[in-house]
């Protein structure tokens, strides 16, 4: 993990995105760019298109028009080459309830290409799931299952974390804990794009790009 | 050059206007060829020495069967274009074609069955052509069902495009397997129109009918596409301006 | 920093699905039971004349196999769609079509292979002579993977729909026709004692063709279903 000292700065750029859902324009002509160490924070009412935008940023959903450029290249052309740089945490945890946390993480790591220099037990430890690695995920609490989903972010070498309400079902201590993890990622030169109802308590030196979709 | 053409045609507004100008021409030439073809087929062409007058249903049945295949291929090609270049208009063509294709397939089946009654003494025979046609009808119905089940119409169009492509790869295999199956189970069924040489006085009305059906398809698909465009683009400025103008 | 290869991602995913199936092993017997049950219904429906049963035997077994395959298809992507795993696959750094192939293979091992294993028993029930049983099994071995492969495209297109089941059968069954025709024909030919190389070669060709094309179509369909 030497991402902090990259020679050519990696940026993720969105150019005049247009998103339409059910005949309604959610947002149009939306442009921004995310640089290493920066976090894009999406704000807006329910239904203002935050989740849609995050899914577009992942490349799961197509924008009606506009372009998304990773290091200047179109992400839909890059395909899997783009996906190795991102990790997505959606509404759904993406964990198998019949598998143990350790097994779930092993698959998450296998789906990526380059793995982080952290082993799976450490990742579980970092999200506070030490000692739970071998019981079925089904038996974890909702908050613990969310922590497991966050641990998934740690096991690949993804630069850009795309987080849709990452703090769902976490208690206050848990939220603070996860904020420190996200900060550490940004300090290492990572990037993030996220939505949250919670006021983010990052330390001052983290650059936040705030985009409010309801104002548009 | 070709790509540019597609992109220009791909603009819904442009397509809407061009289609509007084309439809009357298609309709008029359809009616002319239809009247001429039917008159020559039903009254002028000689009576078949084997099948008598009942063979004349061929002038509907055969072109309808041809159309059922032709439209499926058109859908698959438009589907491929819309998947690769994400062009809205070809998506709309895929969807507008499905119902027309299904209707022609149904027409081919119904006329085939009507023809079968005097020929075989029964409404339905598991003959290779009819069976293939029946399976083709299922493929069309699958496309229509999938399209109506998906709420987001752009997603639906892309899903249907994939299905049309999968279908077009499979149609020759299905057809071949049905032929194989048919020769096994009922050898030497009456071959209806595979005579090596058909008399010109029969052939020309038949081909005229084929052209007539294609013109009809052209007209209908353009009409349906225009309706689809207005529905999809109902929030766009040009559609609203147009509606206001018509209202005045 | 180490790099994980494509083949290890493939085997990881294959193992994952097999482990998941094993943890729900009570459900493993279901496709097989369904297969036997449907087959047993036919003699009850058409009468117990041994000649008649023998004549329809190959067709009955294969129609039952088709229905068993169809019924089990929904489980291929359903739970992954519901819990969000499918989104994660779509965002994998590996080609989705290869991951999809691993899932199809796992699905076939769990739902298709049991049909192959149980076939001799059904052959006895339907009076298929023992000389034709190897051919019957061979057709199942070649044909059921094709059913899983073609079926995967249909499931991928309908996985996001609330009432996908009925549409799925409409999409998939017509595409199953060639497998049905050549497989039953092979068995019938084997019963008479004529070589079945032609039919088996065609079935093999269909297997190779669908092995190449279906994963790509499925990956593209999944991408559409998730968007």
Image: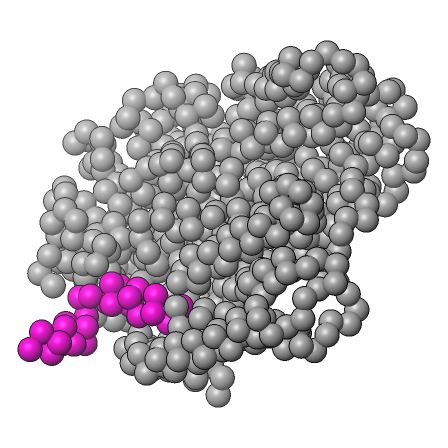
- Measuring from the top left, give residue C151's x and y in whole percent: 57, 41
- Measuring from the top left, give residue A103's x and y in whole percent: 49, 30
Residue placed most toward the observer, C196 or B43 = B43
Give the residue at x 41% y 25%. A97
Question: In the figure, C181 relative to B110: above or below?
Answer: above
Residue placed most toward the observer, A44 or B219 = B219
Left or right? Give the position of B194 relative to C84. Answer: right
Question: In the figure, B48 relative to C20: above or below?
Answer: below
- Which quadrant of the structure image shows residue A31? bottom left
- The number of callouts visible is 0
Left or right? Give the position of C126 relative to A107. Answer: right
- Measuring from the top left, give residue A194's x and y in whole percent: 24, 50
Residue placed most toward the observer, C32 or B200 = B200
The answer to if A50 sits in the magenta stretch is no
Give the residue at x 48% y 47%. B142
Per the rendered image, the range of residues in magenta is B221-248
- Measuring from the top left, give residue A53's x and y in whole percent: 26, 56
Give the residue at x 75% y 56%. B191
Residue B218 in view of the camera:
no
Residue placed most toward the observer, B145 or A195 = B145
Question: In the figure, A69 relative to B131: above or below?
Answer: below
Q: Residue furthest bottom?
A: B1
Image quadrant containing the C terminus of chain B: bottom left
Picture colour scheme: one colour
Dominant SS of magenta comes to helix
Give the residue at x 28% y 59%. A37
């Amino acid at each position: 993990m030497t991402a902090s000292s990259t020679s050519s700065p990696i940026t993720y750029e969105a150019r005049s995105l247009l998103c339409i859902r059910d005949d309604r324009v959610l947002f149009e002509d939306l442009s921004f760019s995310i640089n290493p160490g920066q976090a894009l924070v999406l704000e807006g009412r329910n239904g203002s298109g935050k989740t849609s935008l995050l899914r577009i940023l992942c490349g799961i959903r197509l924008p009606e028009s506009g372009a998304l450029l990773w290091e200047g290249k179109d992400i839909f052309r890059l395909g899997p080459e783009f996906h190795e740089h991102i990790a997505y945490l959606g509404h759904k945890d993406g964990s198998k309830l019949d598998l143990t946390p350790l097994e779930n993480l092993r698959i998450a790591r296998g789906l990526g290409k380059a793995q982080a220099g952290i082993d799976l037990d450490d990742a579980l430890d970092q999200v506070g799931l030490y000692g739970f690695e071998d019981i079925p995920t089904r038996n974890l609490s909702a908050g613990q299952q969310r922590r497991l989903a966050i641990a998934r972010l740690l096991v690949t070498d993804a630069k850009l974390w795309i987080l849709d309400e990452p703090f769902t079902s976490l208690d206050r201590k848990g939220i603070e804990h996860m904020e420190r993890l996200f900060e550490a990622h940004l300090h290492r030169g990572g990037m993030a794009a996220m939505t949250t109802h919670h006021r983010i308590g990052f330390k001052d030196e983290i650059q936040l790009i705030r985009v409010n979709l309801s104002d548009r | 050059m070709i790509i540019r053409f597609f992109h220009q045609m791909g603009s819904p507004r442009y397509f809407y206007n061009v289609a509007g100008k084309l439809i009357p021409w298609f309709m008029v030439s359809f009616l002319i060829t239809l009247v001429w073809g039917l008159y020559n087929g039903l009254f002028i062409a000689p009576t078949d020495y084997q099948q008598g007058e009942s063979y004349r249903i061929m002038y509907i049945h055969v072109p309808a069967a041809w159309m059922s295949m032709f439209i499926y291929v058109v859908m698959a090609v438009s589907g491929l274009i819309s998947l690769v270049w994400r062009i809205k208009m070809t998506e709309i063509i895929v969807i507008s074609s499905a119902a027309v294709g299904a209707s022609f397939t149904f027409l081919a089946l119904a006329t085939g069955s009507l023809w079968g009654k005097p020929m075989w003494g029964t409404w339905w025979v598991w003959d290779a052509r009819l069976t293939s046609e029946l399976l083709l009808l299922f493929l069309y119905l699958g496309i229509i069902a999938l399209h109506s089940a998906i709420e987001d119409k752009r997603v639906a169009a892309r899903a249907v495009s994939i299905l049309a492509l999968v279908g077009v790869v499979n149609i020759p295999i299905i057809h071949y397997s049905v032929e194989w199956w048919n020769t096994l189970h009922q050898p030497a069924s009456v071959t209806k129109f595979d005579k090596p040489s058909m008399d010109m006085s029969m052939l020309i009305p038949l081909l005229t009918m084929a052209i007539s059906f294609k013109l009809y398809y052209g007209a209908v698909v353009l009409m349906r596409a225009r309706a689809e465009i207005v529905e999809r683009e109902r929030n766009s400025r040009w559609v609203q301006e147009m509606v206001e103008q018509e209202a005045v | 920093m180490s790099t994980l290869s494509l083949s290890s991602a493939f085997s990881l995913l294959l193992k994952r699905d097999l482990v998941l199936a094993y943890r729900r092993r009570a459900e493993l017997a279901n496709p097989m039971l369904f297969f036997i049950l449907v087959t047993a219904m036919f003699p009850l429906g058409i009468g117990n004349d041994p000649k008649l049963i023998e004549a329809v035997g190959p067709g009955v077994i294969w129609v039952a196999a088709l229905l068993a395959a169809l019924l089990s298809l929904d489980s291929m992507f359903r739970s992954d769609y519901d819990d969000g795993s499918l989104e994660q696959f779509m965002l994998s750094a590996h080609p989705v079509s290869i991951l999809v192939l691993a899932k199809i293979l796992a699905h076939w091992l769990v739902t298709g292979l049991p049909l192959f294993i149980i076939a001799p028993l059904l052959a006895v029930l339907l009076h298929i002579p023992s000389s034709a049983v190897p051919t019957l099994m061979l057709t199942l071995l070649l044909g059921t993977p094709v059913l899983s492969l073609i079926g995967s495209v249909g499931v991928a297109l309908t996985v996001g729909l609330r009432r996908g089941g009925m549409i799925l059968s409409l999409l998939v069954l017509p595409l199953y026709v060639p497998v049905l025709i050549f497989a039953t024909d092979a068995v019938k030919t084997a019963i008479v004692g004529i070589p079945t190389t032609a039919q088996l070669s065609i079935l093999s060709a269909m297997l190779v063709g669908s092995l190449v094309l279906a994963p790509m179509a499925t990956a593209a369909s999944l991408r559409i279903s998730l968007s």
